[in-house]
């Protein structure tokens, strides 16, 4: 059944690629407003009139009290300040994105005759225990009475024009209401529903992060941003080089206009009760009148979490390279199932338990690329901290054999007359994040000496042949049992993301001096020759320092019978990320790294990079229980990346070095 689902996804993208070419002009953004000229304090309803069967809507209402909306037909969009205001609508369906902007769409006339109740809070997202200041913005006074209502707040009511700061002691979202009355007895009421969001007090400093729904656009297009920061910040300060507006204090700004061609930085500063962090993405936005590609794109993406409980929303980050101009996603089991934006800002919700694939197709004028991650999102009906399984390249009905090498001594899969020194099997998977062990079916284990060893190896799998070694371990041959699956533990577990090679390296001996290096023999089972036209080979061999396929070397299509114990561990890594702190930030002459309470690291390595990617400083630490200190007195002012490898897990933090000269 799994392979049928894959086929459905692949067929979808073949159809999708054709559909993009044929139907790219069918999606158009259009809308109607219930009124285009109103008085201050009045509200407008909007109706979507787009064509092309849109499935997603993103509205921007600059100048209104509701700056954005994602519903199809937004209601009660209220304006309080006289002026003329644009309205922006972006729609998308499974294959395309379209937008429209009506300049000066809404005209707001002054209202000087009737009361208009209005107010604003200094912060609408606050931690528990932080006071919120409310400012009365009511128009057409003077007013003889004020009646504030703060459900969930302390105080819960006030009759002052400017109430004392209101403190919320419980997390949640809360309404705020203001009623004003003028000298003639006329009243006006303003109710802001779910206006104050109260979040837990931060326990770690914030770490800034964000994505844009598109990063390559034409002049005059709009871009929307989503905050992905961790550490529970409640203050956001955005700076959009080349954008209009150029700044924003919203958590998720939308409708940022880029009018002129160029490449532009985006900066986000986040703040909480635990500190402040800054992230600058240099040349993040590319505005061009033509497709800027110089080579075909390379598809890549990650999810912010993959081991989830049903009902959870997952956010995906498009990490494709070589300037793709269009992106098309397929989220098996998710809602929405498809998206045509580079980064789906509203995330994807998974409500049913199961293992689900995710696909991304990217295109530009130079070509296209496609990435399919099998079983990438793991959804459970209840909470789960870890999920493990074994993976193998052995098919359900395939036989496991240990064939001898025709015309020579030894076996395919071990020592033989061809003097194969290294065997490696490629595992194409994205389901798991770490490798815990190798289960190796040993059929022959004879050492030439008492201390003879075989080396087990794991390589990165992003090349045609094994290249970059990421783990290796020597095992005494005398400790291997013939005709059993032998467990080769990996401790600490090896962190992976994507395909990898797993295999072993042999040594050849001639201890009896008979001219044949056959005094040691180790062999691992393989799959029986897949001698049919569509057969695939995953086994690679190395002799005389030259890699080739088992097909080219032996004339068979096969795989190793090894099984890999793999796990996905999101919650534990999140716990580490949430507890680890790097401070002070900004720093000057030193930084300190603290793992947090009850956490311990056997091995801890630190590398600090500048913005060019150059390693400025590195250090290695062992058995870290408390914080460590890194000297930065010789650093210049600027932004740096601190990369920490902690017992096989990689965590990164950004720091700002600020010097006073």
Image (cartoon, rainbow, N blue to C red):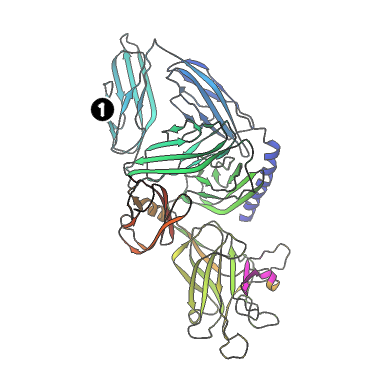
Which quarter of the rendering shows the C terminus?
A: top left
Q: Quadrant of residue 529?
A: bottom right
Which residue shows up at 37% across the image and 38% down it? 234
Could you classify mark 1 by the number of other residues whose Cα lies within 10 Å: few (under 14), some (14-19), or many (20 or more)?
Answer: some
* Depicted 261 relative to depicted 513: above or below: above
Q: Is residue 572 left or right of residue 302?
A: left
Residue 550 place in picture, x, y as percent: 66, 70
- For the N terminus, the quadrant is bottom right
Vertically, is 39 above or below 298?
above
Indicate yes or no whether the magenta region holds residue 538: yes
Q: Which residues are magenta?
A: 536-552
Q: Position of residue 284 (x, y in %)?
A: 52, 42
Q: Quadrant of residue 540?
A: bottom right
- Quadrant of residue 130 in the image? top left
Report the residue marked by disc 1.
164
On whether residue 499 falls in the magenta region, the answer is: no
Q: Percent position (x, y) of residue 242? A: 51, 34
Q: Residue at x 36, y 26 (%)?
A: 120
- Residue 605 visible to the viewer: no
Q: Nearer the viewer, residue 16 or 460?
A: 460
Total marks in image: 1
Task: Return the residue found at the far front.
Answer: 661
Q: Is residue 532 visible?
A: yes
């Amino acid at each position: 059944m799994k392979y049928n689902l894959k086929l459905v996804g692949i067929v979808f993208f073949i159809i999708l690629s054709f559909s993009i070419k044929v139907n790219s002009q069918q999606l158009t953004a259009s809308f109607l407003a219930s009124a285009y000229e109103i008085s201050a304090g009045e509200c407008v309803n909007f109706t979507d009139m787009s064509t092309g069967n849109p499935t997603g809507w993103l509205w921007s209402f600059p100048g209104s009290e509701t700056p954005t909306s994602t519903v199809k037909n937004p209601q009660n969009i209220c304006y309080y300040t006289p002026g003329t205001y644009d309205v922006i609508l972006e729609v998308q369906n499974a294959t395309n994105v379209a937008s429209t902007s009506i300049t000066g769409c809404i005209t707001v006339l002054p209202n000087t005759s009737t009361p208009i109740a209005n107010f604003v809070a200094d912060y609408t997202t606050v931690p528990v225990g932080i006071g919120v200041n409310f400012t009365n913005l009511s128009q057409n006074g003077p007013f003889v009475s004020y009646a504030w209502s703060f459900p969930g707040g302390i105080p819960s009511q006030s009759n002052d024009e400017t109430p004392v700061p209101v403190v919320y002691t419980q997390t949640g979202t809360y309404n705020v209401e203001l009623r004003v009355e003028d000298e003639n007895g006329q009243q006006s009421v303003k109710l802001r529903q779910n206006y104050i969001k109260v979040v837990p007090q931060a326990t770690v400093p914030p770490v800034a992060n964000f994505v844009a729904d598109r990063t390559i656009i034409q002049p005059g297009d709009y871009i929307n941003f989503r905050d992905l920061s961790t550490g529970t910040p409640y203050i956001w300060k955005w700076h959009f080089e080349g954008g209009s507006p150029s700044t924003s204090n919203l958590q998720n700004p939308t409708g940022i206009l880029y009018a002129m061609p160029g490449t532009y930085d985006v900066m986000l500063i986040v703040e909480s009760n635990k500190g402040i962090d800054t992230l600058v993405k240099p040349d993040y936005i590319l505005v061009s009148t033509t497709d800027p590609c110089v080579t075909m794109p390379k598809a890549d993406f990650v999810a912010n979490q993959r081991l989830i409980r049903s009902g959870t929303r997952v956010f995906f980050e498009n990490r494709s390279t070589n300037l793709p101009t269009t992106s098309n996603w397929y989220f098996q089991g998710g809602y929405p199932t498809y998206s045509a934006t580079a980064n789906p800002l509203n995330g994807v919700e998974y409500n049913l338990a199961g293992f689900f694939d995710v696909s991304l197709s990217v295109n530009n004028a130079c070509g296209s690329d496609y990435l399919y991650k099998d079983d990438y999102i793991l959804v459970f009906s209840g909470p789960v901290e870890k999920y493990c399984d074994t993976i193998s390249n052995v098919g359900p009905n395939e036989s496991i054999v240990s064939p001898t090498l025709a015309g020579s001594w030894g076996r395919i899969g071990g020592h033989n007359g061809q003097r194969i020194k290294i065997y490696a099997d490629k595992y194409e998977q994205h389901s798991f994040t770490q490798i815990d062990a190798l289960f190796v079916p040993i059929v022959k284990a004879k050492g030439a000496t008492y201390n003879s060893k075989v080396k087990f190896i794991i390589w990165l799998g992003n090349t045609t042949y094994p290249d970059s070694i990421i783990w290796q371990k020597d095992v005494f041959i005398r400790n291997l049992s013939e005709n059993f699956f032998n467990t080769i533990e990996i401790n600490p577990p090896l962190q992976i993301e994507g395909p990898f090679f797993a295999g072993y390296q042999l040594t050849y001996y001639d201890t009896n001096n008979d001219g044949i290096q056959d005094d040691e023999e180790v062999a691992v089972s393989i799959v029986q020759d897949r001698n049919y036209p569509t057969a695939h080979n995953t086994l690679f061999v190395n002799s005389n320092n030259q890699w080739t396929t088992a097909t080219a070397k032996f004339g068979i299509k096969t795989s190793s019978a090894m099984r890999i114990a793999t796990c996905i561990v999101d919650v534990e890594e999140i716990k580490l990320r949430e507890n680890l702190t790097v401070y002070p930030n900004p720093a000057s002459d030193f930084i300190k790294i603290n793992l947090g309470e009850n956490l311990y690291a056997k091995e801890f390595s630190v590398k600090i990079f500048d913005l060019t990617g150059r390693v400025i400083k590195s250090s290695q630490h062992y058995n870290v229980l408390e914080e460590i200190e890194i000297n930065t007195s010789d650093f210049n002012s600027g932004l740096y990346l601190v990369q920490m490898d902690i017992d096989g897990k990689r965590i990164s933090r950004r720091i700002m070095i600020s010097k006073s000269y």
